[in-house]
Image (cartoon, rainbow, N blue to C red):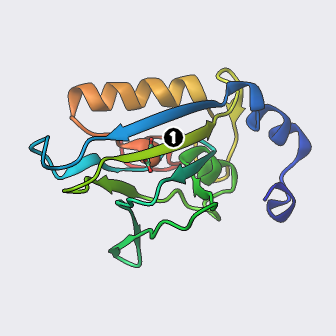
Amino acid sequence: MVKNLNLCPKQTECSLDESTGFVRLYRYPSGSSVDKSWGMMEHTDSSLLSIVNQDQVGGLEIFKDNKWLLVNPISNTLLVHIGDMMQAISDDRYMSVKHRVRVNKQEERLSVCYFVFPEKGSVVHSSKYKPFTYTEFQQQVQNDTNTLGYKVGLQRFKLNAPV
Ligand SMILES: O=C(O)CCC(=O)C(=O)O
Ligand SMILES: [Fe+2]
């Protein structure tokens, strides 16, 4: 991806940092034991990339061409989501994907997700967005979630965007 995007080595060095990655293990209880059909509401990941290993139960959906598509589980296959930070450093050539997780009525679902983030203090440069650090992005997301109840995300940093 870095090669395809022709990213400058300096940007790559500070933005693609292995040390800030982490793994999350999710367990989504089946729908019969919880009164909810959504295990995770629609969102884009704030990461550079997210690598997902879902089990055979399924339930992950992505938003593509204006509709929600079920991502059928394929054994021994990893899914790679583009995150917001990759969207920014690629100047919107790679777009972060909106996704959500539906709870299964009968079976619980397990997934293992690995998220890669930029180094917190490094400045993300993009021709489409004002320069920002990942820490600033995270704070803005937190702020919007607390005050508005949802994540606005990259739109907040868009160049020439109305305030
Ligand atoms: O459990 C999954 O498959 C997706 C989890 C997810 O979207 C996230 O943690 O951001
Ligand atoms: Fe996600």
In terms of secondary structure, where does tag 1 sit? loop
Q: Residue 142: x and y, percent?
A: 36, 26
Label 1 is placed on what type of residue?
Ser
Left or right of 77 on screen, residue 26: left
Left or right position of 97 against 126 = left
- In this rendering, the answer to whether 3 lies above or below 161 is below
Q: Give the residue furthest to the right.
A: 9
Specify the quadrant of the image occupied by residue 65: bottom left
Other-residue count near label 1 (Cα within 10 Å), few / some / many at <14 / 14–19 / ≥20:
many
Find the residue positioned furthest to the left.
Answer: 35
In the shown orientation, is residue 10 left or right of residue 29? right
The residue shown at (50%, 48%) is 158
Residue 75 position within the rendered picture, expressed as x and y whole percent measured from the top left:
58, 64
In-front residue for pair 151/97: 97
Name the quadrant of the C terminus.
top left
Tell me residue 116's x, y (percent).
65, 38
Q: Residue at x 27, y 46 (%)?
A: 39
Residue lying at the far front in this picture: please name it: 106
User: In which quadrant of the rendered image does the N terminus lie?
Assistant: bottom right
Residue under pointer 1? 46
Q: Percent from the top left, x then y, of residue 43?
A: 37, 49
At 33% from the left and 53% from the top, the residue drawn is 101
